[in-house]
């Protein structure tokens, strides 16, 4: 019996150490993701935030703090927050738009990372009221997977507003918040980061095409869906995220 006790004590200590290592590695990814997003022009002063769900505690998530840039996330200032939006660990100031994250994590068990930023071309596209076309390959990633939130230009500062964003997301990948910004989700941090960058690129190409005028027809639905399946593979996100991390590290 004593033997049994000591064995289970050992295994729970091992589980605890494993948990800490996983949390640490995800926090390191969050820090690098913030730097990649800024290097890709996704910063807007200290606005914008990124979060990931804890794999061993799915009702909690870690999130960037208020008052710092996306490239200033550290192990010390990352907050742990529950699905009501309340801080459970950490002393830094919480973003008032936390409800974008908490309500999406509530509504979508498959989502483990949420990013909200204010990228120029995506905002410009949202202001036209038109959806994203497949005028370039990134458009295919969001084919029939891009929602639109049109309730307000204001910050998403309540459970109800966050739930509205989650409704606009539905089963999709991302939401354009009209005249405000984007919310992009992923099963992993890599997926959400690459999705955010691709959405902005797709919006930029579309606005160029529309400004040039008289766009030629898009490719067939079947053709677009084939590309969508190819570029939605988890490996695509990992390979490209890892590349951007290496590049940001090289540049210091
Ligand atoms: Zn915002």
Image (tube, helix red, strand yellow):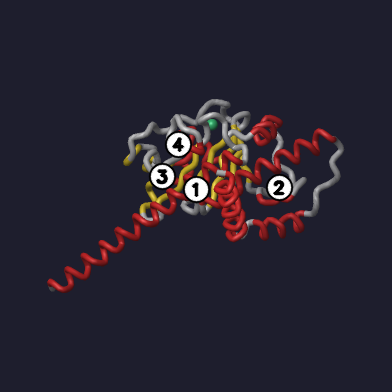
Mark 3 or mark 4, which is nearer the start of the sequence? Answer: 3
Q: What residue is pinned by disc 4?
A: 99
On the question of residue 171 being in view, the answer is no
Q: Earlier in the sequence, mark 4 or mark 2?
A: 4
- Which residue occupies the foreground of this view, 146 or 1? 1
Residue 39, picture quadrant: top right
Mark 4 touches mark 3? (CB < 8 Å): no
Q: Residue 69's x, y, as percent? A: 50, 34
Residue at position x 33%, y 35% in the image: 91
Q: Nearer the viewer, mark 3 or mark 2?
A: 3
Q: Position of residue 62 (x, y in %)?
A: 41, 44
Earlier-in-chain disc, 3 versus 1? 3
The residue at which mark 2 appears reads as: 139
Q: Label 4, label 2: how many angstroms apart (C-alpha)?
A: 27 Å
- For label 3, the residue is 62
Sequence order check, earlier mark of 3 and 2: 3
The response on whether ligand 1 sits within 8 Å of label 1 is no
SS class, disc 2: helix
The alpha-carbon separation of the residues under discs 3 and 1 comes to 9 Å
Q: Are marks 3 and 2 in contact (CB under 8 Å)?
A: no
Badge 3 crowding class, 10 Å Cα cut-off, few under 14, some 14 to 19, many 20 or more, is many
Quadrant assignment for ligand 1? top right
Q: Which residue is mark 1?
A: 113
């Amino acid at each position: 019996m004593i033997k049994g006790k000591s064995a289970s004590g050992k295994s729970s200590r091992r589980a605890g150490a494993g948990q800490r290592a996983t949390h640490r590695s995800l926090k390191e990814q969050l820090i690098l993701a913030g730097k990649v997003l800024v290097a890709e022009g996704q910063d807007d002063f200290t606005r914008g935030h990124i979060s990931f769900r804890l794999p061993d505690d799915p009702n909690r998530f870690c999130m960037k703090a208020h008052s710092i840039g996306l490239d200033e996330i550290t192990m010390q200032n990352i907050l742990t927050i529950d699905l009501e939006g309340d801080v459970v660990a950490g002393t830094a100031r919480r973003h008032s738009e936390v409800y974008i994250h908490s309500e999406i994590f509530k509504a979508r068990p498959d989502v483990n990372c949420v990013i909200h930023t204010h990228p120029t071309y995506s905002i410009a596209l949202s202001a036209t009221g038109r959806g994203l076309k497949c005028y370039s390959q990134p458009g295919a990633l969001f084919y029939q997977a891009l929602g639109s939130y049109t309730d307000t230009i204001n910050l998403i500062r309540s459970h109800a507003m966050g739930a509205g964003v989650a409704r606009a997301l539905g089963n999709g990948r991302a939401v354009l918040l009209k005249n405000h910004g984007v919310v992009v989700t992923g099963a992993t941090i890599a997926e959400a980061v690459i999705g955010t960058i691709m959405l902005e690129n797709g919006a930029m190409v579309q606005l160029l095409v529309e400004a040039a005028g008289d766009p030629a027809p898009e490719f067939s639905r079947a053709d677009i869906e084939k590309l969508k399946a190819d570029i939605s593979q988890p490996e695509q996100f990992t390979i490209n995220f890892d590349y951007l991390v290496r590049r940001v590290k090289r540049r210091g």
